[in-house]
Image (cartoon, grey):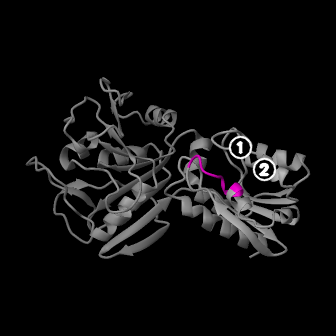
Amino acid sequence: MTQDEIYMLRCMELARMGQYTAAPNPMVGSVIVHQGQIIGEGFHHHPGGPHAEVAAINRVAKQGLLKQSKLYVNLEPCLHYGRTPPCSDLIIEKQFPEVIIGTRDYNAEVNGKGIARLRAAGIKVSEGILESEAQYLNRRFLTFHGKKRPYITLKWAQSENGYMDIDRESNEKGIHWISQPESQTFSHQLRAKNQAILVGRKTVEVDDPSLDCRAFKGQDPIRIVIDPKGQISDKAKVFRDAHFLRFTASPIWENDRKLDGTLGLESLLDSLYEEGLQSVLIEGGAYTLQKFIDSDLWDEAWLIKGSDIIEAGLKAPQLELSPSRKLQLGKDQLMQYHRL
């Protein structure tokens, strides 16, 4: 591994410190190196706060050393005004001779323009250092700006023999737990990493879920409900406050959005993109999950396989891929699938 790669790994380590607070901004870390020694480092914590490059520059005690230092950053420096001034302008002002970048920013306002500005100012720029790792780190942000849709993560729990729920012919209500408490903590951590969580009508009617992060300290995602005919009771927990969107054929509430057909995924994702939602976790039910799978509109999936056997009931979604990795959480097996 080269020295550049080592410092880039440190940038990404710093960037992850903002994984629950930076959205909708990307996770970015920056390291400043002078003669083989790190003299400043920082990361982006929250929207409106200092960008990683600014935080790192501010940590350097002797600002005069910046003229002989390298700046490392896992994402291309911005060059547009948002809540903060352009980082590329500050880098030029501080007269850095060299900047090393992990990956370009796919945001149309940046996407190579930041690099071009630095080079036009006479700064040596190297890009693509651990590029795939840098892109995976900000896969939600980059998918949103590159594909013009949210990054889609699927997640469900199923029994050892492939059932997602018990037989509900008797109209029994309430959650039938398949996974163990350790897996619930993981699931709520996954919720905290995504801006929104989506479920279908039947999941709400049967389980009445809260769709929050109560088992993990993090910001609750926006709750998205697919309710084509407006059948869900307004007493359901998903409607407990204004932190939700309901997609229905006949919008009547302020938080309602028009649903195209029973579940037109292309138009749904277009709507979520217009809402500015970079990432959506799909948690059910089986029909909704399978619809995303069959439509080839997903990026990542997590399957929690419990150890119990369900004799008859609702079959779990079918995903014809081999898992990229497997983990054990107590009695549960956790499998990850991704398409990057």
Residue 324 lies left or right of residue 136; in this view the side is left
Vertical order, 69 against 89 (above or below): below
Residue 100, by quadrant, is: bottom right
Instruction: Find out whether the residues at labels 1 and 2 contact each other: C-beta distance under 8 Å.
Output: yes
Relative image position of residue 186 (x, y in whole percent): 38, 65
Vertical order, 309 against 191 (above or below): below
Relative image position of residue 208 (x, y in whole percent): 21, 47
Mark 1: amino acid: Pro
Q: Secondary structure at mark 1?
A: loop
The verdict on residue 53 being magenta is yes
Quadrant where the N terminus lies?
bottom right
Residue 155 lies left or right of residue 169; in this view the side is right
Q: Secondary structure at mark 2?
A: helix
The residue that appears at 40% across and 48% down in the rendered structure is 221
Residue 98, by quadrant, is: bottom right
Relative image position of residue 225 (x, y in whole percent): 32, 39
The verdict on residue 340 being magenta is no
- How crowded is the residue under tag 1: few (<14 C-alpha within 10 Å), some, or many (20+)? some
Mark 2: amino acid: Leu
Magenta segment, prevailing SS (helix, strand or loop): loop
Specify the segment rendered in magenta: 47-54
What residue is disc 2 on?
A: 90
Q: Is residue 167 visible?
A: yes
Pick the residue in front: 176 or 69. 69
* Mark number displayed over residue 85: 1
Residue 311 lies left or right of residue 249; in this view the side is left
